Image (cartoon, coloured by chain):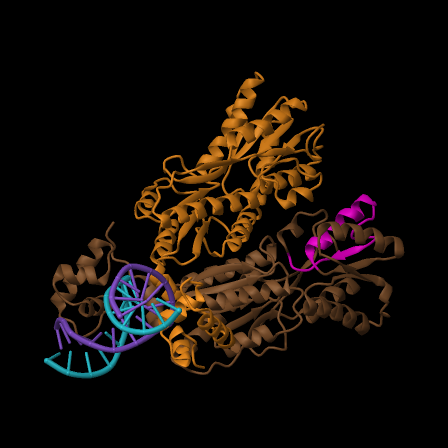
Chain colours: A orange, B brown, C purple, D cyan
DNA sequence: TTGAAAGCGCTAACAG
DNA sequence: CTGTTAGCGCTTTCAA
């Protein structure tokens, strides 16, 4: 099948390639007749510009890349969904890559994306990224980069995030205000900043209400899995039989806690209240339903893309771009796993 | 920042662009010394070939596209995960697009992908796609296309699927064998073939065990949502108080059914057994845990990519490719929502 | 063993 | 209003 190029059209019409190109691009200095002729022929031949040639010429691909720690993950898929939705509106395509929470892999993927000359990159740090030279390099080389969710303060670029300290503070405060006195915390080792911030919020709340911080009430989950929540629930309750509340760093983990408590016939919320974090879908179907903090994934994806898009435009126009940081609001969703 | 091209390297070394290109590509007819010099300089300058120029020359992009009905969806994200994982091993990047179950949108996206000259397309039909000319056109135009999960028999291309009839038959048979006599079915209106096939499997099983098919026992969900399952559960049990089993077309829907039955104090599985389909993660955390059919999403994604990859290679070599169809096995996962 | 030249398809400055 | 020309960066044939 003969492929349709500007040249072909030009030859058929006996005019030059340049004229055809201009006619198709609505240049003002083209005869109306010529233009109609070209446009019609192009349409009837089903002409599609060769995007490689265009990209080569224009130095832009209309493709961005997103690197995400995990794909099968309620919160992260919401982010992807937000990004794809926003990107589509601006005629951008999205290449999705997963870091599997590996620092090394993250470096490789970033490199891969840069070598493909995508127009920009959206990144949520792997749970094991501790140095940031690879990010700085990318920014220096001129590829727009926006961090979302798992960010770092050490790199100067646009970011979309929630205030984990504040959100965790609110979660813990809610437990206190609904009558809990001995509140545990199950955190994670991954996601450095996030985890640290949520623990901090938990501590801040205790402090504000004059509850002494007890290190033995803080547990650490290896992998934030359902199973791990299940196991840690046994531990925490046998270590602290008088526990009456627990703030869990993520809903999946919290649902494991809930399941184990149920088996142990521990009354939730009357004996122990459980507060999750993220508002995953599954928090609506546990029994009792899980109280949690809403973490707006879709919106985070949308905003992250918009920041990146703005930066791409500025870059094209040769204007310096000042990084922006967007903090998305969170709020408590009270359900059956906490007292009223 | 000066960008590193073959030309730059050639100038620095006082040799020609062609020689540099060949040296970097391990051509046999290059002087060893020249080669080392080139390779070293390229490395020290951190040379990255311009992928647009390469694509333009070589007519290949090493990028494929996948169109999926929904992003935030346990089964589908597993598929995406499988595709991305397999693609990465072969140095392919994956553009992810969602059709939102819209036929019109599906056509547009396909068009978009083709115009970007990606190397191949993976597609799961939207729930509203009833004509297939757009697919045939793509195949004719020479873009490799592989259908997965929601396929159609009307298009001659490679496919990866499960046998929905058989799987639904097994599911229903399992209910019968564990003592259910009056078995309902909750199906969907979307996913034409899948839905139809699962209903068929249900009917086949009834027939085999001489249970009369009763149309009034078959319910249709609009959107396969949790809420819809919840609502339909009320309906089915009030219409048929003596119901003792129900085969539900998807786990999410089934979990809604389970929740409603629990509220109504209907003993699952002793009064009514519930069988889901897909083995979503959430089926492990309902109470009781949901018995279901395992649908291997990750593997489906992997296989779909491999078929596409084979086809892309064949196309490059100019060899005709015969479509292949891979049927993935499914099996019953018996949990607490069915009798033993 | 090397390099000149052509060309992938498109765009844009400039001349006519 | 139209066409010529140059060039984006790379690959490959063919001649030297």
Count of numbered circles in the view: 0
Residue name at image x 66 percent, y 38 percent = A290
Residue name at image x 46 percent, y 70 percent = A35
Above or below residue B305? Residue A142 is above
Judge whether residue A190 can be spotted in this image.
Answer: no
Quadrant of the image occupied by residue D12: bottom left
Q: Is residue A12 magenta?
A: no
Find the residue positioned furthest to the top.
A210
Q: Pinpoint residue A256: horizontal percent, then vertical percent.
A: 62, 41
Q: Is residue A127 left or right of residue B218?
A: left
Quadrant of the image occupied by residue A29: bottom left
Above or below residue B310? Residue B11 is above
Q: Is residue A211 left or right of residue B52?
A: right
Judge whether residue B191 can be spotted in this image.
Answer: yes
Above or below residue A234? Residue B253 is below
Q: Is residue A225 left or right of residue A290?
A: left
Image quadrant in which the C terminus of chain B is located: bottom right
Q: Pinpoint residue A72: horizontal percent, then vertical percent.
A: 54, 52
Q: Pinpoint residue B21: horizontal percent, then vertical percent.
A: 22, 67
In this picture, which residue range is highlighted in magenta?
Answer: B250-279
Q: Pinpoint residue B189: horizontal percent, then vertical percent.
A: 73, 63
Q: Is residue B188 left or right of residue A68?
A: right
Quadrant of the image occupied by residue B63: bottom left
Q: Is residue B274 magenta?
A: yes
Residue name at image x 78 percent, y 53 percent = B269
Comparing A293 with A156, the one in front is A156
Comparing B247 with B92, the one in front is B92
């Amino acid at each position: 099948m003969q492929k349709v190029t500007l040249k072909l059209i030009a030859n058929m019409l006996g005019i030059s390639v340049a004229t055809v190109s201009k006619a198709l691009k609505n240049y003002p200095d083209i005869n109306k007749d010529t233009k109609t002729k070209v446009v019609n022929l192009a349409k009837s031949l089903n002409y599609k510009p060769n995007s490689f040639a265009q990209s080569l010429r224009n130095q832009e691909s209309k493709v961005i890349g997103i690197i995400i720690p995990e794909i099968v993950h309620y919160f992260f898929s919401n982010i992807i969904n937000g990004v794809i939705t926003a990107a589509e509106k601006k005629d951008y395509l999205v290449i999705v890559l997963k870091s599997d929470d590996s620092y090394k892999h993250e470096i490789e993927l970033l490199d891969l994306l840069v070598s493909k000359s995508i127009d920009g990159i959206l990144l949520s740090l792997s749970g094991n990224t501790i140095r940031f030279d690879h990010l700085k390099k990318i920014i220096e080389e001129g590829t727009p980069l926006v961090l979302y969710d798992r960010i770092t303060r050490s790199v100067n670029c646009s970011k979309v995030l929630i205030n984990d300290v504040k959100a965790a503070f609110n979660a813990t405060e809610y437990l206190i205000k609904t009558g809990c006195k001995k509140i545990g915390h199950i955190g994670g080792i991954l996601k450095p900043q996030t985890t640290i911030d949520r623990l901090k919020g938990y501590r801040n709340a205790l402090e504000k209400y004059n509850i002494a911080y007890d290190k033995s009430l803080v547990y650490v989950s290896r992998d934030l899995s359902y199973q791990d929540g299940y196991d840690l629930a046994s531990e925490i309750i046998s270590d602290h039989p008088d526990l009456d509340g627990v703030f869990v760093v993520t809903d999946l983990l919290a649902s494991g806690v809930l399941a184990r408590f149920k088996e142990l016939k521990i009354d939730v919320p009357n004996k122990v209240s459980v507060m999750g974090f993220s508002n995953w879908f599954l928090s609506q179907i546990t029994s009792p339903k899980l109280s949690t903090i809403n973490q707006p994934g879709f919106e985070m994806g949308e905003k992250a893309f918009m920041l990146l898009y703005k930066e791409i435009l500025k870059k094209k126009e040769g204007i310096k771009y000042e990084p922006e940081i967007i903090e998305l609001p969170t709020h408590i969703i009270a359900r059956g796993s906490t007292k009223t």
